[in-house]
Amino acid sequence: MLVEQIAVFVENKPGRLAAITKILADNKINIRALSVADTADFGILRLIVDNPQKAAKCLQDGGFTVVVTEVVAIEVEDRIGGLATVLGHLADAGVSVEYMYAFVNRSGENAIIISRFEHMDNAVKVLEGTGVKLVSKEQIYSM
């Protein structure tokens, strides 16, 4: 139930994000979700795309430093307390969240939370054991 995520190291310069998205567009790669975190000198762009291996190669060929990592896609009810319930299950099991970001495919539907955990296998077991719906990579890539 793991999803491949592309992490791209980006210099904090005007136009760098535009260059990345142009490479993806030129290669017919669709972005499904993204997150940007920055430091003083560079940022980390995390992407879920419909073809992660092709995206990684195209971006590397374009001169970017790219890492492919595995994350978990969790379906969360789009209601007050939906995320709190999921995080409560993880906290009760002692699972540490490294980072997360979210998106909603269509208004009024459940949210998808992209998460990276300190111990991925343990997190998946906890989530499955508590009835939390995990979304397959095929479902994510085809959204």
Image: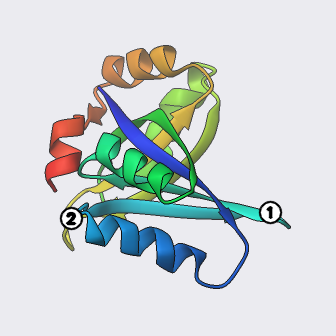
Viewer can see residue 81: no
On the image, numbered disc 2 is attached to which residue? 28
On the image, numbered disc 1 is attached to which residue? 39
Q: Residues within 10 Å of mark 2 (few under 14, many from 20)?
A: few
Asked whether, in this view, residue 27 is left or right of residue 63, the answer is left
For the residue pair 87 and 117, the one nearer the viewer reads as: 117
Viewer can see residue 143: yes
For the residue pair 111 and 54, the one nearer the viewer reads as: 54
- Residue 93 placement (x, y as % from top left): 57, 19
Mark found first going from the N terminus, 2 or 1: 2
- The single residue placed furthest to the right in the displayed view is 40
Disc sitting over residue 48 in the figure? none
The secondary element bearing badge 1 is classed as loop
Asked whether, in this view, residue 37 is left or right of residue 1, the answer is right
The amino acid on which the numbered mark 1 sits, given as a three-letter code, is Thr
Of badges 2 and 1, the one in the foreground is: 2
- Residue 25 placement (x, y as % from top left): 29, 71
Does 40 sit above or below residue 93? below
Q: Which residue is drawn at 37% across and 37% down?
A: 4
Which quarter of the picture shows residue 92? Answer: top right
